[in-house]
Image (tube, rainbow, N blue to C red):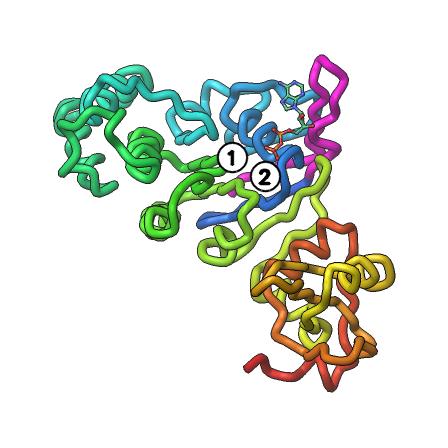
Amino acid sequence: MLSIQNLVKVYPSGVTALRGLDLEVPRGMFGLLGPNGAGKSTLMKILAGLLEPTSGELRLGDIDLVRQPERLRPHLGYLPQEFGFYPYLTGEQMLLYLLRLKGVSAPRGLKHLCAELLERVNLTFAAKRKVKEYSGGMRQRLGIAQAIAGNPRLLIVDEPTAGLDPEERLRFYRLLAEMADERVVLLSTHIVEDVAMLCPRFAAVRQGRLVAITSPTEAKAALQGTIYEGTVTLAGLAELQRTRRVTQGVLFEGRHRVRLHEPGGDVPPGFERVPPTLEDAYLLLMQGVAPTAAPPERAREVAP
Ligand code: ADP
């Protein structure tokens, strides 16, 4: 269990990135979902021991991360947002180098461990290829290989799927899901689909504060019977944005497909009730809206 209490971070520039965060993260995958600038990377760097918090308490089991950060090191795996690779090394050479830096103990030798890790992340076929020839997804998998070396109790992955194509993303999801069986995995992302696919629970963060701790199922259920979809012109969209709670407006075949949160059910002509998505819930939370439930008979309706 990772426990975070009243965590505050004020950068020397005066920017307050974390405004008193409280969070208990159990074993398994946990998402930290928020837009750019919400404070996710700041939290990740503090947990990884790369930044000092201004105040607050952090514990992983019996380890006090603020007072004894060196005790965490052997139990920590970290895949930062910007992972530096040496492009002219092969995947195997790069991983060996990172394992030496990390000081991982390898009773059967580092080369053996390296081969095992490459196998685990499905990169054996590319062990002898230069990292510069790797796709984005292969680089991220190599990043995970170094992060899980030493079998850490806490694995932190910061925005790992940004820039991956859909197929690479799916493959990466499978790998991350496997990693969450026996440890705490904290996944930071601004991509709602990452959370929908992977996280039984997640925290939504906005401007350095937690705005919700929930599950994808709970977050959608809270909106049951309150989301309506219709198609409007650009002028119609502007009008709705002024007068209604718009969760999403996307271009579809040259017109604007709009989703509204309307608990009372009083919607413009042509709008139809639709099942809520996690994206609806997230976008409402980011607008600072605690979703209002529909009347009980509509809230109980089962989504088609
Ligand atoms: P996220 O990872 O959610 O995008 P960050 O933790 O990177 O958010 O940033 C949170 C806030 O802290 C932003 O306002 C950002 O500009 C600021 N910030 C991040 N790093 C620094 C830094 N090294 N110095 C000053 N401000 C920073």
Query: Type of residue at label 2?
Result: Ser
Q: Residue at x 62, y 43 (%)?
A: 34
| Residue identified by numbered label 2 | 3
Quadrant (top left, top right, bottom left, bottom right) of the C terminus: bottom right
Q: Specify start and end residues of the magenta stretch as a single range.
A: 1-21
Residue 24: x %, y % from top left:
60, 45
- Looking at the picture, which amino acid does disc 1 mark? Leu
Residue 175: image x %, image y %?
32, 47
Taking the image as four quarters, which one is ligand 1 found in? top right
Q: Which residue is mark 1?
A: 60
- Is tag 2's residue or tag 1's residue first in the polypeptide sequence? 2
Nearest the eye: 68 or 212: 212
- In the image, residue 92 sits, relative to residue 238, either above or below, namely above
Q: Residue at point 50% right, 26% down?
A: 48
Q: Quadrant of residue 299?
A: bottom right
Specify whether 86 is left or right of 21.
left
